[in-house]
Amino acid sequence: MRITRLETFGNEFLAFVRVTTEDGQTGWGQISTYNADITAQVFHRQIAPHALGTDATAFADTLALIGEREHKYPGSYLRRAMAGLDTALWDWNGKRLGQPVVALLGGTPGPLRAYASSMKRDITPKDEAARFCALRDEKGFTAFKWRVGRECGRDLDEWPGRTEEVIPTVARALGDGIDKLVDANSCYSPARAIEVGKRLQDEGIGHFEEPCPYWEYDQTAEVRAALELDVTGGEQDCEFATWAHMIARQSVDILQPDVMYMGGITRTLEVARMGAAAGLPITPHAANLSLVTMCTMHLLKALPNAGRYLELSIEGPDYYPWQEGLFLGDPYRVEDGHVTVLDAPGWGVEINPDWLARAQWRESVLE
Ligand SMILES: [Mg+2]
């Protein structure tokens, strides 16, 4: 069944992809968020020409071929654009077979435990603790992640003393029986990361994400070796050779690929297999409520080495104004700390037609 048309609907922040095959059937996916207008251009220039006319039912090799034909352009933008093709074709395949993507991946629909993920550093420790406790009590979350240090911060803090305060303030407010995670977003030198890591351990925090600049795999390995808690990372990485190095170097205890940064589900499955072979769990990065979180939900319900929970952003319109009104209904509704993967075909979500009508549209068609 040949691919005959590839469309993008988007803006600067996000773009959806619609694939159409010669029988008229369609599927929906998404390219990665941010600079999505640039990525859409990469999609039509460097992805669509190779994909049009290929078989939509078996596309793993098409993805590999695109990488080979565009071999002078490895890295982020090509993979971000490729994610649009991959995720649209998984949806197309699910709709063709009348099955949710999770079933195509060998899993089952149903509830999935989520951790409430804060994106904010400009929030005071007291306010962070207060909103976490409200979410724990109102939505039943049993796991939370908050921020320490400054993003790529060269050992600096968002303001002096914030990290020393936010660690115990939030951890103690949440209390026992809650999984506690923090993210340093590439802030620290190894010495400072180890110092902060010991404070985390003292407060019962079990997950220390991206302690050192993410490209410094030896630094991260040094931190991991010095601490008892789980050192985690990988969200920025999109090439298999990098993952192989990270695993061989024993940099992290948990791998965190982002489905969209990786180039889609197919390539993320390969990282999951690499992790399984090394005995490592997968707790993907999914930092906003666009399609990335739904794709990650289907993946986690199918992976044999899935981590303990889904990352679920708790940020609303003040932080992510562009994620409002993307879907009909409420696909990320939380009950007892769980989201639900539905039994509907494909991704099981309906993109808001009003949003699509306002988006910039472009198509590539089979000549
Ligand atoms: Mg992170």
Image (cartoon, rainbow, N blue to C red):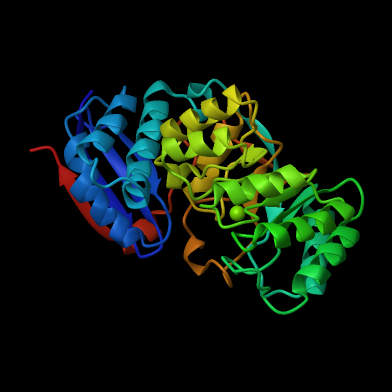
The residue lying toward the viewer, choosing from 259 and 55, is 259
The residue lying toward the viewer, choosing from 291 and 300, is 300
Q: Is residue 115 visible?
A: no
Q: Position of residue 268 (x, y in %)?
A: 48, 35
**Residue at 55%, 45% in the rendered image:** 234
**Left or right of 289 on screen, residue 171:** right
**Left or right of 237 on screen, residue 88:** left
Asked which quadrant contains residue 160, the reply is bottom right
**Left or right of 128 on screen, residue 19:** left
Q: Is residue 21 above or below residue 328?
A: above
Q: Quadrant of the N terminus?
A: top left
* Residue furthest left in the image: 367
**Residue at 16%, 40% in the rendered image:** 49
Q: Give the image quadrant in which the ligand numbered 1 is located.
A: bottom right
Q: Is residue 95 above or below residue 356?
A: above
Q: Position of residue 53 (x, y in %)?
A: 16, 30
Asked which quadrant contains residue 82, the reply is top left
**Left or right of 238 on screen, residue 7:** left
Counting labels gives 0
Q: Quadrant of the C terminus?
A: top left
Q: Position of residue 15 (x, y in %)?
A: 36, 55
**Residue at 54%, 52% in the rendered image:** 216
Q: Is residue 95 visible?
A: yes
Asked which quadrant contains residue 362, the reply is bottom left
The residue lying toward the viewer, choosing from 260 and 100, is 260
* Residue furthest bottom in the image: 160
Q: Position of residue 54 (x, y in %)?
A: 20, 28
**Residue at 62%, 42% in the rendered image:** 251
